[in-house]
Image: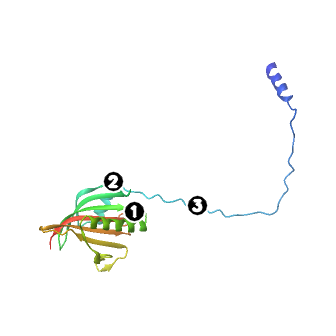
Amino acid sequence: MVTILLATVFVAGCTENTTNTSSPSPVASTATTTRKVTPTPTPVATSIPTASEFTDRWVRSNPNDMLVTPFTKSVNERGHVTFTGVYRYSGPSRDADYTSTFELCKDKADAQQTYQQAVNQASLAGYMIDSQDKNKNEGGILDTDIAVMTGHIPSNKALTNGIVIGCQYLDDYGIGYYVDTSKFLEPNT
């Protein structure tokens, strides 16, 4: 106990060169200031589905087509997430297996640029692009939110390679903007 008391005396005695200042008492103010604070909006995180989730969405949206190979998920050379799968289309004009790649884009401008790049790549690969199909009239209704190009590689064979490149501005698979490139074999006409 004596030791504690001595320590207290030594600390209490060290008051040399210490300035003691006091603050004036605050003045009461009758004015009040109110300010409305608006919260900063939190960006909504876009959820990219898994391959099986995308496959399920595609199957629900395309009940008349038969899925041959479920969609797989990857990242392409542009850094875009892609989903690639094979489905069988049966229609009045042809029965064909389509290898379809959905390339997710950031926004409408990115989708338009990616679409043009896909069309240019198809042309360089030998596809003859039918430009009159741009903004295709689907089901009797002109849909300006869908840009479509079709093409084929000329061939002397009974079957020739066909391609459909679509720029979709609609969120019909829950993935936002995307470019769909589908390749298939079709009868040579």
Q: Which residue is mark 1?
A: 105
Task: Residue 84: give x, y in percent of width and height.
Answer: 29, 58
Dividing the picture into quadrants, the one containing residue 169 is: bottom left
C-beta proximity under 8 Å, tags 2 and 1 = no
Q: In the rendered view, does 50 fall on the left or right side of 160? A: right
Q: In the rendered view, does 31 fall on the left or right side of 104? A: right
Q: Which mark is residue 74?
A: 2
Closer-to-camera residue (177/122):
122
Which kind of residue does numbered mark 2 sit on?
Ser
Query: Helix, strand, or loop for circle 1?
Result: loop
Dot 2 alpha-carbon crowd within 10 angstroms: few under 14, some 14 to 19, many 20 or more: few
Mark sitting earlier along the chain (2/3):
3
Query: Helix, strand, or loop for circle 3?
Result: loop
Task: Residue 31: give x, y in percent of width and height.
Answer: 80, 63
73, above or below 178, in the image: above
Q: Residue at x 26, y 58 (%)?
A: 85
Q: Residue at x 42, y 68 (%)?
A: 109
